[in-house]
Amino acid sequence: MMDNEKMKFSIVICTYNRDQFLERTLESLNDLDYNNFEVIVVNGPSTDNTSLILEKYIDRIKIYNNPLANLSISRNLGIRASQGDVVAFIDDDAIPQPNWLHQIKEIYDLNEIVGGVGGRVYGPGGDHFQFHNGIINIWGEADAKREEPGPFISPKSKNYNILMGVNSTFLKSAMINIGGFDEYYEYYHDESDVCVRLTKAGYPIFHHQEAYVHHEFAKSHIRSSTYKLNWYPIVKNTVYFGIKNSRGIENIFNRVFTPFWVANKRLNEFKLWLRNGDITKEDYKSFKKMWLKGVLRGYWDGFTTNRRINNDLKQKGEFKKFNKKKSADSSIQYVNNDIYEKYGICLLSKSYPPYGNGGVGTYTKVLAEGLVKRGYPVYVITSGLPSYKLSMNGVHLISADKIDSDQGFEFIPETMSVSKTNLEYSMRVSYIVESLMNEGKIKVLETPLWDYEGLVSTRIRSLKTVLRLETPLKVAAEMQRWGWNNDFELSSLLEKELINSCNAVITISNDIKETISRKYNLDWSDKDINLIPLGIEKNSLSNDEIISNSHSNNQITVLFIGRLERRKGVDILLEAAKSICLKYFNVRFILAGDDKIPFTDGETISDLFIKNNPLIADRIIFKGEVSEDEKRKLLISCDIFVAPSRYESFGLVFLEAMQYSKPVVGTNIGGIKEIVNSDDVGLLVEVEDASMLKESLIALIESLNLRLKIGNNGFERFNQNFTSDIMVDKTIKLYDKVIYKK
């Protein structure tokens, strides 16, 4: 048991052609609140700019090269180079939480004998877990996501606790005793095999219920898309794993036949993907060929070869403690030959993925991470966090929920609960903002209009405030048919006060500026108002990959993403979809989004539709809320995207579809018509016109050429006007203007 930071960690990063991710991971280690650690990077055999990036860190980290594309060899090189008590592995496309090592150390301190410890792993987008409390059986069948910590710490078992490589730490002395990683595993099951062998040797594996790491899950030489993996090593290593780890536990009959039975499950997966249209016949043939080759090689090597363990993992050397410091160019930027300090920025958003969803949270996350990539310190004040403070992808998140406010608004009657709740929240936010301002951490605050979160903060002396417009309360209430009352009237007046109190205003579309001017009787002539459309990050897939991931069979999928509520026009869509499905039997509709919202007489629209339309219920699929990763898969695989909203201040979801070259169908209203500005980039219909919507969808259903033409044109429009880089760069220019009055 060790106290404070006596325990030394050696963080090992094995990298291979991930230069665009590696530096971000290295920079994130500056944010760890543990100090007693060294960093070892094993590079190889990279052919990109990885070596140039590592040169910048040469005086702070240990660098080793591996000429072979074998992860287990790289991991063993890292172990051999380490001088810490514990070797901690993290991937080159991952970001640890600041308290990662402190929490990992808790488990080592609590247990007398420990082989390894790991925590939870967030997937891309940070809105779901890839791994928590994983276990595996002796045949290589894993359960990666379980609610309770794995109980399998006995050496004699058929099930074992495992860790995910991106968030795995091991006692170095234990790794030396078992010979490190079996270098047979070039990829896949390498860390699981180590966990099993450690446990069998008397060194149990434990799960921490936090110790979070955020994993980008970037493409690699093994992984190019959701389905198109190199299945040969995956199948080969699964068979080899079962044969080796069942030795001494199962009889020879089971050791011969069970690995094939397990591998056959993978083959059945391929068949299911083919039936669902997720892969083509050519893909299936290719996957099956890799599968057969993997099965045969796994059997041969499992029964006829020895493990490739490394008995030379001891190496004398110095512990090279990591010197925390940001890159030399992280605090200065040059604009028009003027030197500007990269000042701190505070963003407000009650929701922030994965702890909350919504349009404001989505664009705030994109903006925050874009600003961080450009070297700006960014603080986001939000709600729903598991702790008061945490860091995600370099963004500092602070929870306003954890602040006690001794200044309530008792003078506001309980009948005005919306206004009272929002003002109390705005007051709590202002305490945090003022503290950041007084500590010199920020110079500018950006607030959304919705719920007037930044209203109280506009009173802070010397703080520059920027407001970003989105759908105001008056429009939302009208669309949703909320009854207008005194509470809403006060809230709308407070929205107007926020607009008048800020130093500058960002409008995300011309329409929302005009709508607010009309609804709130505002004259923009005396305001510093700037048009900055929202943007999203470019996807990492090529156009060929997108097309190959789409349905290539005769089935056509029409996708809707959004809350299943009146404002989103979902009732109009279902009216059109019903007619289309009765005529076109190869068409299906997928609706993804919150489907628990009461629509009529307390019933949801999904329940109403399924009950009243049993003949086509199997082709109108209600997915409910989906994660960012699931949403991405739906967008990639659909043929047409549709969202017939009654109003959108912008229409971010259209960009999400256009970035994957999908033809879009929307309504001629709000910000949508500024995104889809011609028939060449998408089709627009009049609001609440189900007949026109049906005709537009049929035109796309009947013409592949039209779908491809509009999809490609839409992608070009997105790429030229609506990327996250464009949004972030324009926002920075506005911040500069507000701060430096240029």
Image: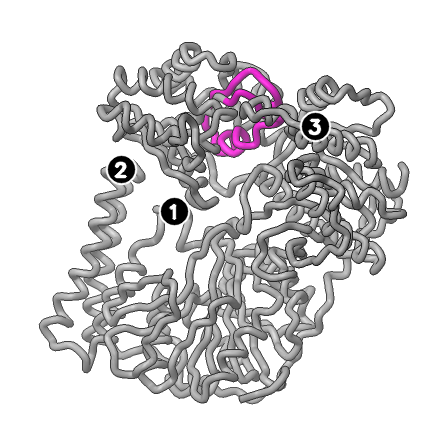
Front of the two marks 1 and 2: 2
Location of mark 2 (residue): 276
- Binning the other alpha carbons within 10 Å of mark 2 as few (below 14), some (14 to 19) or many (20 upward) gives few
Tag 1: amino acid: Thr
The residue closer to the viewer here, 564 or 403, is 403
Q: In this rendering, which labeled residue sits more in front, label 2 or label 3?
A: 3
Which badge, 2 or 3, is on the more N-terminal residue? 2
Q: Is residue 543 left or right of residue 519?
A: left
Q: CA distance from mark 2 to mark 3?
A: 51 Å
Q: Position of residue 450 (x, y in %)?
A: 66, 35
> In the rendered view, would you say 296 is above or below 464?
below
Which residue is pictured at 28% across the width and 23% down the height?
Answer: 612
Instruction: Determine which residue is flagged by label 3.
Output: 489
Kindly identify the amino acid type of the residue bearing the numbered disc 3.
Answer: Glu
Name the amino acid, label 2: Asn
Picture coordinates of residue 427, whole percent (x, y)? 75, 48
Marks 1 and 3, how far apart at CA: 49 Å
Residue 226 got which mark? 1
Residue 255 location (% of width, % of height): 15, 72
Which of the two discs, 1 and 3, labels the residue nearer the N terminus?
1
Q: Quadrant of residue 675?
A: top right
What range is drawn magenta here? 645-671
Q: Is residue 299 magenta?
A: no
| Local SS, label 1 | loop
